[in-house]
Amino acid sequence: MSLVKKFATVGGATLGSRVFGFVRETFMAAALGTGPVADAFNTAFRLPNTFRRLFAEGAFNSAFVPLFAKEIEARGMDGARRFSEEVFGVLFTVLLLLTIAMELAMPFIVRELIAPGFADDPAKFASTVTFATIMFPYLACMSLAAMMAGMLNSLHRYFAAAIAPVFLNFILIGVLAYAWYSGQDAVAVGYSLSWGVMAAGLVQLAIVWVAVRNAGIRIGFRRPRLTANVRRLLVLALPAAITGGITQINLLINTNIASAKEGAVSSLVYADRIYQLPLGVVGIAVATVLLPELARALRAGNLNEASNLQNRSVEFTLFLTLPAAAALLVMSEPIVRLLFERGKFLPESTVVVGHILAIYGLGLPAFVLIKAFIPGFFAREDTRTPMIFAAISVAVNVSLALTLFPSLAASGIATAEVVAGWVNALLLFATLAWRGHWGRDIPLLTRIPRLVIAAAVMAAALHYAIQWLAFPLSSAAPLAIRAASVCGLVAVAMLIYFAAAFGLGGASLGMIRRSLKRKAAPAAASAAGEGTDEP
């Protein structure tokens, strides 16, 4: 299966999850707006979600995958199963103890760590503590699911792990629809959503567990022991967790800062949901597929294939991400107005969230490139260097957020995230190039500025089109007219971008053909033990 087809498998499943995520957030915006219950729920959900991405997805997709793949090659499926059981026993025990400790300490954690600004509002503070207590076991479910997803990715079975998150959105959409039908008040909606998150964690864990069994691996529980393999995993996982979760570290810190202003937390969450669509479809798909592919090429000693994988991944991400970034920058308000402005989500909220989304658009290429660069380190079992750069990025984010928040509020926090993202991306790329781990690709270097110009041409056309369509895009226009106008703008923008990209030479049919074909030499494929991929 070609690299782009693998990207499409993961990206397509992620796209489905993100689309239903939009539906979920649309319902939530109508039910809660940017009011105190929305702030409480979003802050409470941020806690298990952050831990999940730090210690589950970040650690296991970067540390567990290469070690699990190495066990398959060295000792076969039986050796890989024993390794996974050793890890499962330790992980389950740690998660159980962590969950108990966090549940008992939840009031302190909310008051001192994640939302000190809520302490002045007893009702909001109490709701945040209760919601977080209900939802925190979601972390254990998703951490175990992330481990099994890493196993599936190593076996080149990407779909089940990618599709599982959509069930969170299915369940929460159902909860919100029932709340609307039964006329629940805001606090009751918050409670229902919290229990819905907990149920979704169990469902997602069940999906990947069944997929692992269908892949031929049955995991049994072993007494937790720090074997040599587990110790090696922990050595790699700790810095990998910090590095892979850099965005989440920044978001948790920013939630702490934003809690001082009413509505700031929810405004950041709504904007984050929109820009997560291109980031998830492109960035997460590339990171998920590239790591095992790159690790396999390096184990086979095929440096040319490894270099080609990295270059094609960057080419693919920029080709799709640059126009998305330009569109978010230029038409953020019409997008927010169409998706969220109804019920308790007022026009004033549209302006705030739209401004934040435009800022995120400037950082989108950096956030996606980070996903493409980090596998170049992790596949070589170097998790220390990205961790150092992650720490630098966090320092930049915190200092800028504290400086800008008093004057720019939530927009200042978004600006800090974007600057920190670009610092991280540039440090990662410079180090790969300096170490000789980034093959020089003249066609790629000549295409990048042309793709930037094509995106700029598209943005300029969008800017004038939005002015011309001022009324159809406004709050006064009927919803159908607004939807048709936004969809029409997106369609025209895509035509302009692709025409400009191909016309300027930023893209070509040859580039697409190369992406659709596997370039590895037969010997390399054989050395890597390449088998049939999941359809």
Image (cartoon, rainbow, N blue to C red):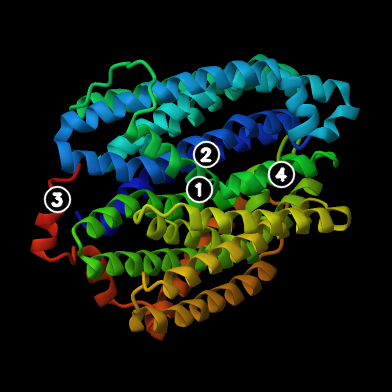
- Is residue 2 among the parts visible in the rendering? yes
Task: Residue at 48%, 46% (x, y): give it.
Answer: 240
Which secondary structure lies at badge 4? helix
Where is residue 96 shown, x and y percent of the image?
51, 17
Q: Secondary structure at mark 2?
A: helix
The quadrant the C terminus occupies is top left
Of residue 209 and residue 75, the one placed in the foreground of this image is 75
**Residue wearing tag 3:** 530
- Report how far apart the C-alphas of labels 3 and 1 lie in the structure: 27 Å
Q: Where's residue 115, x and y in %?
A: 78, 34
Image mark for residue 244: 1
In the figure, is residue 220 to the left or right of 433? left
Question: In the image, is residue 292 above or below residue 27?
Answer: below
Q: Residue at x 46, y 56 (%)?
A: 371
Crowding at dot 2, Cα within 10 Å, few <14 / some 14-19 / many 20+, comes out as many
- Work out how far the residue at label 4 is from the one at label 2, CA to CA, in angstroms: 15 Å
Real-space Cα separation, disc 3 to disc 4, in angstroms: 42 Å
Q: CA distance from mark 2 to mark 1?
A: 8 Å
Give neighbour class at mark 1: few <14, some 14-19, many 20+ (Cα, 10 Å): many
Residue 331, located in which quarter of the rendered image? bottom right
How far is disc 3 from disc 2 in space, using C-alphas?
29 Å
| Residue at numbered disc 4 | 253
- Work out whether residue 150 or residue 39 is closer to the camera in this orientation and state it: 150
Label 3 vs 4, first from the N-terminus: 4
Mark 2–mark 1 contact, CB under 8 Å? yes
